[in-house]
Amino acid sequence: MSETEALRAALREELSYLWTDLQTARRDAYKGGWSMQCDWIVERIKTITPLVGPTPWTELDIQLIEDGVYQRIHQEIGVDAPYDEDGVRQHRARLNASTRGL
């Protein structure tokens, strides 16, 4: 792996962690809303995404897609980040079914 490829891989991994950090920051925000911490993480996501491309929606917390956060961030920076609406609905149905059994 070349140095450039290694750097891109590291940035992709960091970007994935940032999306997880964003979901955590949202959960930790007052009444599950939005916080300055969320804004700070979004700015980092916006900086890295154009360099390595979007994190696939399948690697994110589904709520970020359901709430439109994933779509809004990519729209704001002009990066195409397709996702499968049917796949999102099916994933939510599976999550709901699994929590009913608890």
Image (spheres, rainbow, N blue to C red):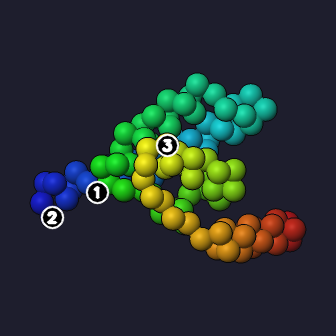
Q: Is residue 97 above or below residue 50?
A: below
Question: To which residue does mark 1 refer?
Answer: 9
In the rendered structure, which amino acid carries the disc numbered 1?
A: Ala
Circle 2: element type: loop
Outermost residue toward the top?
Answer: 36
Q: Are marks 3 and 1 in contact (CB under 8 Å)?
A: no
Q: How many marks?
A: 3
Circle 1: element type: helix
The reply to whether residue 94 is in sight is: yes
Q: Position of residue 83 (x, y in %)?
A: 56, 66
Which disc is residue 1 wearing? 2
Q: Are marks 3 and 2 in contact (CB under 8 Å)?
A: no
**Residue at (65%, 51%) from the top-left corner?**
68
Alpha-carbon span between mark 1 and mark 2: 10 Å
Alpha-carbon span between mark 3 and mark 2: 32 Å
Q: Are marks 1 and 2 in contact (CB under 8 Å)?
A: yes
